[in-house]
Image: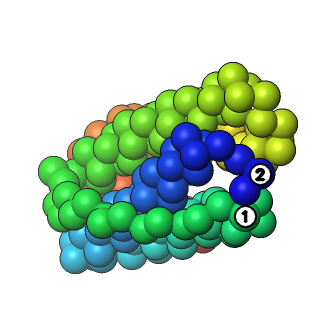
Amino acid sequence: MMISEKMQSTLNDQINEELFSSYLYLSMSAWFQSINYKGFAGWMKKQSTEEYEHAMKIYDYLHEVGADVSLDAIKKPQASWKSPLDAFKDALKHEKHITECINKLADLAVEEKDHATNIFLHWFVTEQVEEVGNATDIVEKLKMIGDNPAGLFMLDGQLGHR
Ligand code: FEO
């Protein structure tokens, strides 16, 4: 195995974090669908797929370096939110949490002088800047829109074209 036991277990934890992210956004997608916001629902469904792909990147990397994949139970995600703003605020909070996890992983790679894993993680560091940026942008728009149905209708249409 080309990585430490600790790195192996922390990367396995990150697979679980990414799979939970996928599950959370799928739950948000289903909730948006249930209240007929098809654009928001589509955006979240796409996000859910991306999170699954993030998990798979780590899954493939573990195999590549001769480490073991061990899959843990995935937490049950929340199933409903008070408003679109409430859901996207939660998504933003979650992405900030994921950024922290990635940063901790990157710290560990530096500490262990694990150059291969450090370089592997660069993609995730960059991706998190984008993910937090996107979620922040939508939260800000939803704050501006407030309870205006026309505004919500328009943003739903826009995000459906992601
Ligand atoms: Fe895979 Fe949204 O972080």
Mark number displayed over residue 130:
none
Provide residue 45's location: percent of width, then percent of height. 46, 72
Depth order, front residue of 161/127: 127
Image position of 45 with respect to 1: above or below:
below
Mark 1: which amino acid? Answer: Gly
Residue found 77% across the figure and 66% down from its top: 64
Q: Secondary structure at mark 2?
A: loop
Report the side of 111 relative to 143 (left or right).
right
Label 1 to label 2: alpha-carbon separation: 7 Å
Q: Quadrant of the N terminus?
A: bottom right
Query: Based on the displayed image, in which of its 4 quarters is residue 97 positioned?
Result: top left
Judge: label 1 CB < 8 Å from ligand 1.
Answer: no
Image position of 152 with respect to 27: above or below:
above
Residue found 52% across the figure and 45% down from its top: 10
Provide residue 5's location: percent of width, then percent of height. 58, 46
Provide residue 75's location: percent of width, then percent of height. 25, 60
Depth order, front residue of 97/113: 113
Residue found 64% across the figure and 26% down from its top: 107
Mark 2: which amino acid? Answer: Met
Q: Which residue is mark 2?
A: 2
Q: Quadrant of the C terminus?
A: bottom right
Structural crowding at the residue carrying mark 1, measured as other residues with C-alpha within 10 Å and reported as few (<14), some (14–19) or many (≥20): few
Q: Secondary structure at mark 1?
A: loop
Image position of 99 with respect to 80: above or below:
above
Report the side of 153 relative to 80 (left or right).
right
Q: Which residue is mark 1?
A: 66
Residue found 65% across the figure and 61% down from its top: 67
Is any atom of residue 37 visible in this view? no
Report the side of 4 relative to 36 (left or right).
right
Numbered marks: total: 2
Circles 1, 2 touching at the beta carbon (< 8 Å): yes
